[in-house]
Image (tube, rainbow, N blue to C red):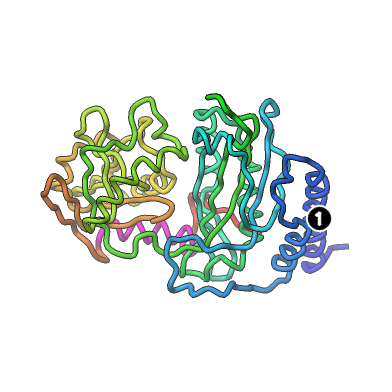
């Protein structure tokens, strides 16, 4: 006898509940999770209530005022791994909050850590989409290998992201009014006094609703004294220690009224590379150029997606060394990243010279932005197979 849709839904709920309960029962007995002291069973009860009620519930947030800053949500997802095991335990949901770290942990002493960033979008029908989460999982695995860390499998990574989104689904902004930003972290949490890989690792995902990364127009300044990355370093992976060294250059630039810093390559000081948290593209005619990824530039997932979209729209895309002089006669410049998505650049200032670029609704950047965000939010058919339903 065929089961009704409601009956099938109820069976799915039971299966999920039993699976999550079995995870918690098996994990609560493991000492390595004791530092996460918030009540897991209470978190699960509230999690089930919010997910399986069949209602669209929203948090008390002024969605129109969202910027890119942390809003504390309800839950985070945690997995652990000891050195030698190389396999992460089944994860648990727990209340979002502080975690305990040994003062000699690898992440605190030696910066042994990676992070990722991806977004969940609300569709018009209230469904929720993730954008290319497998790419984030693969990039984390690549970074983990570079940093001598075990990493979750692609399946574990995506499952953790989905669980985090579902547990915090009331924080996913309404369609067209922002996104839920998910931050996966991989950290060396075991104690270490000497310079060597940590003995224990934690994979943790949390989330926050976000709006625009830059609400004002983007005015870049070229940094020709400080380098973001050097050949043979970790510039090509999303390592925790990559970011704080650029704070000084970024802070000084913002004090002068600039939005972002554009870094040059460390070897010649002639080729543009990327911003503090974004990849860069220049347009001239029908040709879109972007610096090639060769170990000093982060292989951005939005970057990769824009390259593919631009190619399908008939533009010639070149990945190559881009000399700084080419920004002088570019028609358009735009930046990409998970946080900012795709944003046009108004101007670039280099050695006191300011160059301005085409802006407005008729730009190529706007066309690419509309296509990309249309796929991300379900307004445009995803022929690329990039989006993943969260249910």
Which quadrant of the figure has residue 300?
Answer: top left
Residue 6 image position (x, y, % from top left):
79, 69
Q: Taking the image as drawn, is residue 364 in sight?
A: no
Is residue 373 highlighted in magenta? yes
Residue 352 image position (x, y, % from top left):
11, 49
Is 58 on the left or on the right of 212, as rendered? Answer: right
- The outermost residue toward the right is 1
Which segment is the magenta one? 363-380
Identify the main secondary structure in magenta: helix
- Split into 4 quadrants, where in the image is the C terminus? bottom right
Instruction: Look at 25% across and 27% down and name the residue there.
Output: 267
Which quadrant of the figure has residue 171?
Answer: bottom right
Is residue 154 highlighted in magenta? no
What residue sits right under mark 1 in the picture? 15
Residue 279 image position (x, y, % from top left):
34, 45
Pick whichever, 331 or 7, lies toward us: 331
Residue 9 image position (x, y, % from top left):
77, 64
Instruction: Look at 29% across and 36% down and name the residue there.
Output: 227
Give the structural element (helix, strand or loop) at label 1.
helix
- The outermost residue toward the left is 353
Q: Is residue 225 above or below residue 21?
A: above
Pick whichever, 236 or 123, lies toward us: 236
Is 367 on the left or on the right of 351, as rendered? Answer: right
């Amino acid at each position: 006898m065929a089961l009704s849709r409601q009956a099938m839904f109820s069976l799915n709920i039971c299966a999920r509940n039993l699976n999550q309960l079995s995870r918690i029962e098996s994990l609560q007995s493991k000492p390595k999770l004791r530092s996460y002291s918030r009540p897991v069973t209470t978190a699960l009860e509230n999690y089930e209530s919010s997910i399986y009620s069949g209602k669209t519930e929203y948090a008390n947030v002024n969605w129109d005022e969202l910027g890119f800053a942390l809003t504390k949500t309800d839950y985070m997802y945690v997995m652990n791994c000891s050195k030698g095991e190389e396999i992460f335990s089944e994860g648990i949901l727990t209340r979002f909050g502080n975690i305990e770290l040994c003062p000699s942990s690898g992440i605190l002493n030696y910066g042994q850590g990676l992070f990722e960033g991806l977004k969940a979008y609300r569709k018009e029908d209230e469904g929720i989409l993730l954008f290319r989460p497998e790419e984030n999982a693969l990039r984390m695995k690549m970074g983990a290998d570079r940093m001598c860390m075990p990493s979750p499998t692609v399946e574990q990574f995506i499952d953790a992201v989905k669980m985090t989104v579902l547990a915090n689904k009331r924080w996913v902004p309404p369609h067209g009014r922002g996104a839920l930003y998910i931050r996966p972290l991989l950290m060396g949490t075991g104690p270490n006094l000497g310079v060597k890989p940590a003995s224990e690792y934690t994979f943790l995902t949390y989330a926050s609703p976000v709006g625009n990364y830059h609400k004002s127009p983007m005015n870049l300044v070229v940094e020709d004294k400080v380098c973001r990355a050097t050949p043979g370093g970790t510039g090509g992976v999303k390592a925790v220690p990559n970011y704080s060294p650029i704070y000084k250059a970024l802070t000084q630039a913002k004090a002068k009224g600039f939005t972002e810093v554009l870094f040059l390559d460390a070897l010649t000081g002639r080729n543009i590379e990327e911003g503090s948290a974004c990849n860069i593209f220049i347009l001239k005619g029908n040709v879109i150029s972007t610096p090639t990824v060769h170990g000093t530039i982060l292989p951005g997932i939005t970057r990769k997606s824009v390259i593919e979209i631009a190619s399908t729209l008939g533009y010639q895309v070149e990945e190559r060394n881009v000399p700084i002089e080419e920004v002088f006669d570019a028609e358009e410049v735009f930046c990409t990243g998970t946080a900012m998505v795709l944003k046009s650049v108004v101007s670039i200032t280099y050695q006191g010279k300011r160059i301005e670029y085409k802006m407005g609704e008729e730009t190529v950047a706007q066309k690419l932005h509309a296509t990309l965000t249309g796929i991300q939010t379900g307004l445009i058919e995803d022929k690329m197979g990039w989006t993943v339903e969260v249910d």
